[in-house]
Image: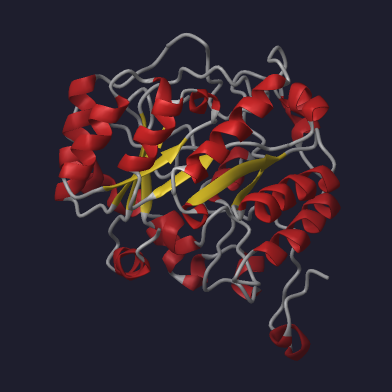
Amino acid sequence: MIDFEKLDRAYAEDGFYALQLEVGDVCYQGCIYCYMNALPESRNMLSDFLVEEILEDAARLGITAIEWLGGEPLLRKEIFRFMEKARNLGLKNNMWTGGLPFADRNVVERTAGLCRNGLISIHVSTVNPELYRVLHPGRPADDLHVILDGVKHLLDTGYPAEQVLNSVTFTGLQPADDMIETMDYFYRKMGIVSSLNVYHTYLRPGTSDTELKRFIPSPSEVKKVYKKYISFMPVKVLPMNCVNKQYCSATLAVLNDGTVSPCATIRDGCPEKAGDMSFTGIVEKNRDYLNFKYLKDPGNLPEDCRLCLLNDSCWGCRSRSYAAGLGLYGKDPRCFRKYTRGKKERKRENIS
């Protein structure tokens, strides 16, 4: 449930609507393409005091929603206490979980109660058990059934399907048809739409560029997936990033090591870290960097973007540009669109 009035106002006023808050890096799901190398044992974790301090600052900054991230945020012992504090501060709780903790029905029900006015996102990039094991090496294929059963229980609690997302990552390790089948499964069987992310080349820090290239899907496969993706969505023209540029601009992140970043998938950020300086102080000092203010001037968009029919809602994925060495403001290397503002192109979206 996005409050679009507040989102649009935050964008127009160079403010922030959502805070992505990584409470730690522990996760058992073992996604081979994970952007932060989530681990079975903790390496970085925000302290209880710092999480609560950041929540208080977020409320003071006029932020509307907390995007709870990890690792796996539901593995953090204090997560429900944090969520209760956020709710008491008037903040919406949006939970981003891999789904394995949903094996515990009590976890499902508590999450549903605390996210009643927000969103719950789970992460299933394939419903094919064999491909699941490829994408999650070392994990049993039964994990997939555990997650799907947990999602079904979530819906059985009465939690609305329209407040659930399946956050998928499309990589070169699976064919477009498999990604389409996965999105179709959630939409047709559960009424859940997917949040589509296309692989970022800098994922798996410390891995060689050659090794990372195998995760990159071809432009034709990306185009095929997007063409099907729009059939599930009420809006038939979608940006190349996982959200529109307004949400992208009005979101910022605190990573599990205290780094304050424009986006959780940009593993870099402000020179000051949360804990060394107040979160409010960091935001005020770095506001223009954190909300991509440079790109709000259409003249500063990458050349192709300046000509694109979608640039009212899209400026490409800033994380993919950064990952490809093009800086925060470069062209999204995964964008397959070839728009110009000619007469024919004004009449229709050219992805057929």
Q: Quadrant of the N terminus?
A: bottom left
Q: Residue at x 81, y 37 (%)?
A: 174
* Residue 70 visible at all: no
Residue shown at the point (30%, 69%) measured from the top left? 9
Residue 180 percent coordinates (x, y): 78, 50
Residue sitting farthest toward the top:
41
Relative to residue 235, is residue 265 depicted above or below?
Answer: above
Q: Is residue 225 left or right of residue 279?
A: right
Name the residue located 49 percent from the left edge and 24 percent from the top edge. 101
Residue 117 on image: x %, y %:
33, 53
Judged left or right of residue 67, residue 266 is right
Q: How is the image coloured?
A: secondary structure
In percent of the image, x 52 and y 74: which residue is there?
Answer: 312
What x and y, as percent, mark residue 60?
14, 49
Residue 191 seen in the current view: yes
How many numbered marks appear? 0
As rendered, which of 114 and 343 lies closer to the eye? 114
Q: Nearer the viewer, residue 222 or 345?
A: 222
x%, y% of residue 323? 60, 38
Relative placement, left or right, of 237 versus 322 is right
Using residue 209 as the reference point, say whether residue 238 is left or right of it: left
Q: Nearer the viewer, residue 62 or 319?
A: 62
User: Which quadrant of the rendered structure holds the C terminus?
Assistant: bottom right
